[in-house]
């Protein structure tokens, strides 16, 4: 039972590069979301989706894009990486928006 | 707006002593409240949730939380802490199709 799988676990980028963080879940959850975690700031929501084909912005969406073409996958794209995007990123899913969230193991991104 | 606050950045206790991690909430209507734990270099794990009913909620790993409406609090408790309970703890509340997290409390349990 894989749960929520994130790849890659670690990534180093140069300023201006683009990349995609992958997230997949095998629990048939409708709700998926991306958070970033920074020291002293807790978790901040980047984007979320309430179902395939539906996405919306969270608290800190600038510089990130998402899409939800299938129930299982919810990739996060960094369009032009900046040092301020150095962070640990977590993907999460749940059966509904007010339910228990299942988190991936995280992706640590460093932008030089 | 629905929100939670964790007034303590850090909590230090000795192994075997009671552990309390504080959370206060600001919620209109009947609140849903959650606790999550994050062990080093891991994702968050669900501990417990309050929806309605008993004010004392039991969760994973021997943790429980007490919902107190008059004090707008939802403190996480464990009667006897273990060194392995050392982790980062978050309380959370649903808000507009998402969970809003507190800033987190780092718990250190010394042997």
Image (cartoon, rainbow, N blue to C red):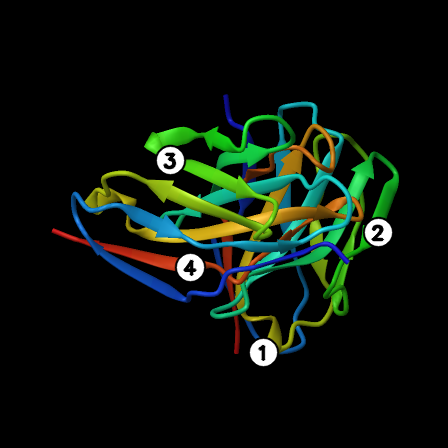
* Residue A68: percent from left, percent from top: 80, 40
Mark number, residue B84: none
Q: Which residue is mark 3?
A: B63
* Residue A90: percent from left, percent from top: 57, 50
Q: Secondary structure at mark 1?
A: helix
Q: Which residue is mark 4?
A: B105
Q: Label 1: how many residues lie within 10 Å, few (<14), some (14-19) or many (20+)?
A: some
Q: Could you tell me which residue is drawn at 65 percent across and 47 percent down?
A: B93
Q: Which residue is mark 2?
A: A56
Q: Earlier in the sequence, mark 1 or mark 2?
A: 2
* Residue B106: percent from left, percent from top: 37, 59
Q: Secondary structure at mark 2?
A: strand
User: Would you say the residues marked 4 and 2 are in contact, meaning their CB atoms lie under 8 Å apart?
Assistant: no
* Separation (CA) of disc 3 from disc 2: 34 Å
Q: Nearer the viewer, mark 4 or mark 2?
A: 4
Q: Label 3: how many residues lie within 10 Å, few (<14), some (14-19) or many (20+)?
A: many
Q: Which residue is mark 1?
A: A83
């Amino acid at each position: 039972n894989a749960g929520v799988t994130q790849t890659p676990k670690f990534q180093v980028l140069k300023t201006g590069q683009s990349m995609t963080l992958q997230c997949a879940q095998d629990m048939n959850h409708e709700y998926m979301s991306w958070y970033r975690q920074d020291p002293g700031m807790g978790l901040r929501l980047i984007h979320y989706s309430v179902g395939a084909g539906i996405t919306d912005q969270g608290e800190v969406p600038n510089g990130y894009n998402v899409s939800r073409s299938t129930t299982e996958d919810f990739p996060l794209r960094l369009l032009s990486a900046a040092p301020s995007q150095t962070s640990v990123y977590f993907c999460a899913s749940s059966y509904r928006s007010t339910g228990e969230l299942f988190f991936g193991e995280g992706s640590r991104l460093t932008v030089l | 707006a629905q929100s939670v606050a964790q007034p303590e950045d850090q909590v230090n206790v000795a192994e075997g002593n009671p552990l309390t991690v504080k959370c206060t909430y600001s919620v209109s209507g009947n609140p849903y409240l959650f606790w999550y734990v994050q062990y080093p270099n891991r994702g968050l794990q669900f501990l417990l949730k309050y929806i309605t009913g008993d004010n004392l909620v039991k969760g994973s790993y021997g943790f429980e939380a007490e919902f107190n409406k008059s004090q707008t609090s939802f403190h996480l408790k464990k009667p006897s802490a273990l060194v392995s309970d050392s982790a980062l703890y978050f309380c959370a509340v649903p808000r507009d199709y998402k969970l809003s997290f507190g800033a987190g409390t780092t718990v250190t349990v010394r042997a």
